[in-house]
Amino acid sequence: MKHLYLVAILGVILLSCSPQPDNPADTVYLNGTIYTVDDSNPKVEAIAVKDGLILALGNSSDMDQYIGQSTQVVDLLGMTMTPGLIESHAHLMGIGYNKLELDLMYVKTYDELVEKVAEAVAKAKPGDWITGRGWHQDKWIEKPEKLVNGFQTNDQLNEVSPDNPVYLSHASGHASFVNGKALELAGIANLKGERPVEIEGGEIIVDELGNPTGILSERASGLVSRLIPNETPERAAEALTLALQELAEKGITSFHDAGSGQDVIDLVDQFKKEGKLTSRMYIMLTGRQPELLEEWYKKGPMIDEDHLLTVRSIKLNCDGALGNRGAWLLEDYSDRPGHRGHETLPMSVVTEVSEKALPLGFQVCSHAIGDRANQEVLDRYEAAFAKNPEIKDHRFRIEHAQHIDLEDIPRFGEMGVIAAMQAIHLSSDRPWAIDRLGEQRIVDGAYVWQKLMQSGAVVTNGTDAPVEPVDPIPSFYASVTRKTLAGTPTEGYEATQKMTREEALRSYTLDGAFAEFEEEFKGSLEVGKAADFTVFDKNIMEIPEEEILDTKVAMTVVGGKIVFSKE
């Protein structure tokens, strides 16, 4: 960013002898290709900032009137600026902890996973837990010889870690892979069933002899995860620091944290008070802690005046994911007859929370991936709305909305329910999701962005990190191409559902702001709105689509402050 300082110094020299403006800006950005997401003024080349807000927009020549002796002048050199990107569904602490544990997101075979565990065991003390996340059996380039219900078994894991308990979360977060030591500690090392052992909201996968294979699906993972020692405050602070650094580097200026407890809220608030919060936070209260919800019902939403930390929504986890066949379906899985996934939360809880939250000013955000889960949640929302007809602006959300019954798609627009989707899931999941659902269900209701938007629904974008990397570029690419990151198929999957680049940008900016009741403050570049910007080294709105994935974030600005700059 040498040009930044050179231009600023030159400006001081030239202006020292010139009349000073009545209302000088703190910072002026010149010579950019700036997309505003404001229909009345869609594209400009310069922008002036004062006190963390946008002072003026226009041509570079228009900005002289805002440049004073102390104004910092940034020459964008033709680079592309957009409103600051909003990650509308991800897991803040998960991003940080993923950097402190085994990162299995890029593991390509079971043998490679085992090798990483062996390396960790060699560095650990006997009895220490080995934890990690990110594996996905359907993304491996080769399958293990022994599979049970499509999953690997823990034989090799037991060989490399006989004395250290191992707990490895699936990329989706909806299953886990554990070794024999962990099963032993949990008291489930020897089960004598002939089929998967069902527990409420989950299952323990067993082999033909009734022995656990190490795969715990949905709520069964809790049988082992509850034994893992609690995180220390120091490690939590380190994880949050790493997460914020990652957000800044990836151009994320606002972040919707999809379900956390009071400990995370308090830690984020501490960072805010210490001036270390470099992304605006919209934290959903986890529905897994009923006592937490009761506390917040009494005190009501926390709507931050400086727009840095807001708590006004509740996250409910209503089913699983397609990857582990935990998504709750109306009909059987195509590749597992007789199985329809899991209702991981009683629907009575969705009813109770929705009816309590709505009149108190809380938004409800329900995780629903399968068509049965989406239908059930819509039914509960509809009933809650009917009981509170005077409340029109509820903005209830369904998180993921990944697979929807054809008849339920119009209900999103009719009811004003936001579809908080992650386009990158299409790139990652679509090649194998067709095996789960079959062609007809895929075409009718899977990843149907255009059908939802045409119903009148708001569709937001994101990554669900650490399920996927928090990098918005691949998700933007998936939005406009509907291809895998390898560029296949040529025309994209179900190409009629592609977003335009304008729609994709809006889903990552203004629509994300709408989904947190902040569209009057941020999400588009207009006078008086937040000076939150993301700057790219390529013009993502015009370059050939095959170049989008090569684009990098050059600068991230939050409230007028540069929180990341690529040297």
Image (tube, rainbow, N blue to C red):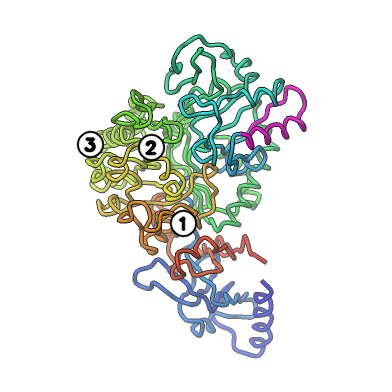
Which residues are the magenta region? Answer: 111-131
Q: Position of residue 385 (x, y in %)?
A: 26, 38
- Give the spatial CA distance, label 1 vs label 2: 20 Å
Q: Are marks 2 and 3 in contact (CB under 8 Å)?
A: no
Earlier sequence position, callout 2 versus callout 3: 3
Amino acid type at image mark 3: Ala
Closer mark to the observer between disc 2 and disc 3:
2
Closer mark to the observer between disc 3 and disc 1:
1
What residue lies at 46% left-to-right and 21% top-to-bottom?
A: 203
Residue 545, above or below 159: below
Q: Are marks 3 and 1 in contact (CB under 8 Å)?
A: no
> Which residue was labeled with disc 2?
435
> Which residue was labeled with disc 3?
386
Q: Position of residue 518 (x, y in %)?
A: 42, 54
Amino acid type at image mark 1: Gly
> Which residue was labeled with disc 1?
487
Would you call the spot at circle 2 few (<14 residues within 10 Å), some (14-19), or many (20 or more)? some
Is residue 550 at all visible to an observer of this figure? yes
Is residue 361 at all visible to an observer of this figure? no
Q: Nearer the viewer, residue 500 or 177?
A: 177
Q: Secondary structure at mark 2?
A: helix
Q: Secondary structure at mark 1?
A: loop
Q: Are marks 1 and 2 in contact (CB under 8 Å)?
A: no
